[in-house]
Amino acid sequence: MRRVLAVLAGLASVLAATWLYSLKHDTARLEAKVHATERAIERAEGDIAALKAERAWLGRPDRIDELARKQGLEPIRPEQYGRIGGKP
């Protein structure tokens, strides 16, 4: 009887160790996946910040005014204002 219990206890120990190793391996794999996702998020946030800065630089009024004048455009004159559906 003691021998059977000892064998069962040994078998249970081996099964528990195998299960624990498997759990550790799965945890390490998930941890690597989380780190990769976090790095991707950080890269995306950096890209977003760069794009916002570029949009702010491109949308400067003095830059747009200069480009418009190079194409022959000028600011609106008072006589160009009108009313919809009526005479000015």
Image (cartoon, helix red, strand yellow):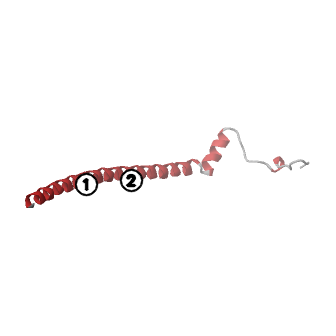
Please give the label number shown on residue 38: 2
Query: Residue at left 52%, top 48%?
Result: 54
1 or 2: tag closer to the N-terminus: 1
Q: Relative to residue 88, is residue 57 drawn left or right?
A: left
Query: Residue at left 63%, top 45%?
Result: 66
Q: Nearer the viewer, residue 44 or 20?
A: 20
Q: Amino acid at mark 2?
A: Glu
Quadrant where the N terminus lies?
bottom left
- List the single residue furthest toward the top: 71
Q: Nearer the viewer, residue 82 or 77?
A: 82
- List the single residue furthest toward the right: 87
Q: Nearer the viewer, residue 42 or 81?
A: 42
Q: Is residue 25 above or below residue 73?
A: below
Of badges 1 and 2, nearer the viewer stands 1
Residue at which label 1 appears: 24
Q: Residues within 10 Å of mark 2 (few under 14, many from 20)?
A: few
Q: Nearer the viewer, residue 51 or 80?
A: 51
